[in-house]
Image: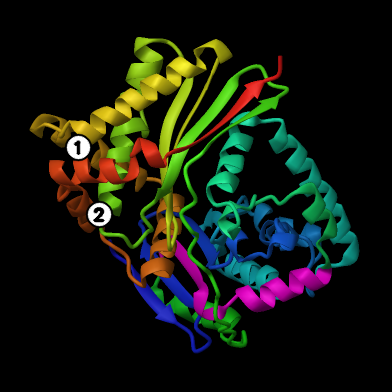
Amino acid sequence: MEYQLHTLQNGIRVLYHPAQSIVSHSCLMINAGARDETPEQEGLAHFIEHLLFKETSRRNTSQILNRLELVGADLNAYTTKEYTCIHASFLNQHLERTIDLFEDIVFHSTFPDEEIEKERGVILDEIASYLDQPEEAVQDDFESLLFKGHPLGGNILGTINTVKKISKIDIKSFIDKNYNTSQIIFAVSGNYDFKRLIKLFEKYFSHIPANNNTKNRKRPAQNPASTQRESKAISQTHCVIGTQAYPSSHPKKSGLLLVNNLLGGMGMSSRLNLEIREKYGIAYTIESNYIPFTDTGLFTIYFGTDSEKAERAIKLVNKELKKLRENKLGTVQLHQAKQKFTGQIVLAEENRMNLIISMAKSLMDFNHIDSLEDVINKINAVTADDALEISNEILDANQLTTLMFEPTD
């Protein structure tokens, strides 16, 4: 995977991926997310992400939003448990506009009191909307259960109580502590001369003072497996089954990604979808997911179904997990699983925004970026014995936690 890298004296890095297109995709990745909050600050990283678009020392809200949208560009942002990401897609000639805006909103936002109060109301509405979507709420509540007592268990949006209490002091303190220049990456995929790109980057970012505060992230403990049922004013049962899994640097990560894709990943041909939706017609949506963090991981299976079908769905899920734990994949099965997964990976590279964000995250986590060939080689190196061992380590019925949202009577 072709790319070039430049680091400023303050530690901020620029990552360039050349692409023969008139459209560029760019992101500014900050290694600061929901897990860096205290329990009393839950939702703070996400709150700040919203406020970055409100006012700077040079621009008001309208000027910030129009800076790129008036030239047909798309500007957005998101917050995860570990990162804050601002991203934009634009015609190549608007690169300087984008660099200028990113630098302005990240390093010169003023957080006026009236904007804090307006955005507080917006986020409280967002929380209310999320609570009306049990398929999303059950996922977040499951993480709170699995990572109980640890910041990874916090809700990215925060709670009504914590969001109401967030102050300007909290905002500025979080940024000072967590927006470390050595853990900020500006990445762009487009058709540029790298030297010109570096000149623009240095023009807007070289004057930023170095800030290299040390993060104090702690690995979560492995809480005992449990089963919890909650009654909700909903029409279906929503269920999540899962456990902690391998971190992003673990040598078995590629193997678990492959096993997850086979079990309940993308497409209609996953084992869970074929067995539970296609064969028995029990659930409209059933899927599994594996999300690696820097020091742990999250493996989950989700489905939603009618209440009277829920217990049968759980039995069928356990049946599929047992197959993976007890039956080694045959040569043809393993080949097909690899072929499907690597094909999906290659096709995903066509989405250049996702690609440049993935490259920035890889550089942040590992200080290097695997080529597409490297990624595929790691997948193809997974053996049937590896898949069996991984299945027994991660899909052990005795260590799986279950959370169910059930309709009230």
Query: In the rendering, at what x and y percent does residue 365 appear?
Result: 41, 67
Q: Of residues 6 and 170, which is closer to you in this image?
A: 170
What's the residue type where badge 1 is placed? Gln
Query: In the rendering, at what x and y percent does residue 309 appear?
Result: 50, 13
Is residue 375 depicted above or below 242 in this figure?
A: below
The residue beneath circle 1 is 339
The reply to whether dot 2 and dot 1 touch (C-beta < 8 Å) is no
Q: Which mark is residue 190?
A: none
Task: Left or right? Give the position of 103 relative to 10.
Answer: right
What's the residue type where badge 2 is placed? Val
* Residue lying at 28% horizontally and 29% vertically, measured from the top left: 322
* Residue lying at 44% horizontally and 51% vertically, measured from the top left: 354
- Which quadrant would residue 215 be assigned to in this image? bottom right
Query: Counting other residues with Cα less than 10 Å from the Cα at mark 2, is it few (<14), some (14-19), or many (20 or more)?
Result: some
The residue beneath circle 2 is 375
Q: Is residue 47 visible?
A: yes
What element does badge 2 sit on? helix
Is residue 78 depicted above or below 18 in this figure?
A: above
* Residue lying at 40% horizontally and 42% vertically, measured from the top left: 399
Which range is magenta? 168-191
Is residue 236 depicted above or below 42 in this figure?
A: above
